[in-house]
Image (tube, coloured by chain):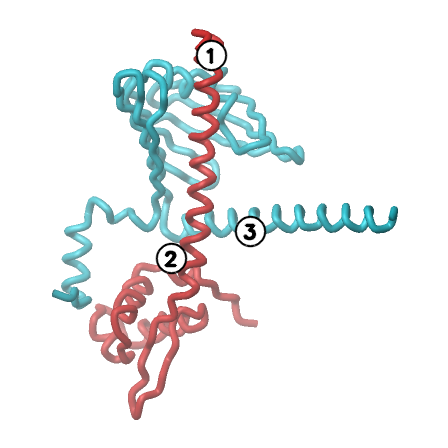
Amino acid sequence: MKARRDVYQAIADPTRRAIINMIAAQPHNVNAIAEQFDMTRQAISLHVKILTDCGLLKIKQRGRDRFCEAQLDQLSEVSAFVDQYRQHWESKLDAMETYIEKLKKERYGK
Amino acid sequence: MRWKPTLRNLKKRDMENKKSSTHDRELVISRTLNAPVELVWEVWTNPEHNAKWWGPDGFTNTISTMDVTPGGEWNLVMHGPDGTDYINKSIFREILPFKKIVYEHISYPWILATITFEARGEQTFINWHMLFESAEQFMQVVKTYKADAGLKQNIEKLAVYVSEMNAKSKS
């Protein structure tokens, strides 16, 4: 069975993030992507495959060329959860703020 | 001009962005607190006070060690509402009284936290920077948090469902 891929795994790798950046601006074919990196074509193909499996990239056939297009909808899910996680830390500051107010009242009665 | 993502440009950008090359594995929050820095520092560094606000809503904390000196240990156990204990072991790395605290959270997940305090008269600006080990680990933490949040939502949904069922069976 194939390991389940997800969007978090996709963007955890710097090369894959660079590929997403590239194709987000405009679709590129796989060769054009491979040319930009100091890696073998096979390595890039694997990254493209992972991005496809994660639903961040769609390959479109145009004549003899295969173009990679970015599918960015899923990224908003990630940023929503990063925001929620940030909120988890913000709530620490909330609790600290509330506690300070309580302490000030106890000490200075104001 | 549009930025062209050639390898050279990517490398150049990485170099220019050295400052923010950690952007994919960090979290920064800040706030102006309505108290002088001496009080904020005390509330942060005194275990009696720290235990009162650390940890998520509904949690209580037990601090067994809090040695706020460079190399000093900070051992805190968070007790979850369901009785689960979460062990948090950290080591203080840098202490500048009323200015800066750097601690390394050595239990999972590894975090290097830098908290700076800026006195602004009767107020204090606090900046909290958390650096995770890697983008992978940061994503893992976010994912786990997402899973926990999802689980919590499911339990809440289940509770609502069960209480609705109860109401129905009684009526």
- Residue at 63% x, 35% y: name it: B84
* Residue kind at label 2, given as amino acid type: Ala
Furthest-bottom residue in view? A63
* Residue depth check, mark 3 versus mark 1: number of the one nearer the observer: 1
Residue B147's disc number: 3
- Residue at 61% x, 49% y: name it: B153
The answer to which of B99 and B158 lies nearer the viewer is: B158
Residue B15's disc number: none
Q: Which residue is mark 2?
A: A12
Residue A54's image quarter? bottom left
Furthest-left residue in view? B1
Furthest-top residue in view? A108
* Residue kind at label 1, given as amino acid type: Lys
The answer to which of A108 and B139 lies nearer the viewer is: A108
Chain that is red in the image: A
* Residue kind at label 3, given as amino acid type: Ala
Q: Which residue is mark 1?
A: A105
Chain letter of the residue beneath label 1 in the structure image: A
Chain that is cyan in the image: B
Q: Which structural element holds mark 2?
A: loop
Residue B120's image quarter? top left
* Above or below: residue B166 compared with residue A64: above
Discs 2, 3: same chain? no
Nearest to N terminus: mark 2 or mark 1 = 2
Alpha carbon distance from label 2 to label 1: 46 Å
- Residue A32's spot in the image, x, y percent? 23, 78
Tag 2–tag 1 contact (CB < 8 Å)? no
* Above or below: residue B92 compared with residue B37: below
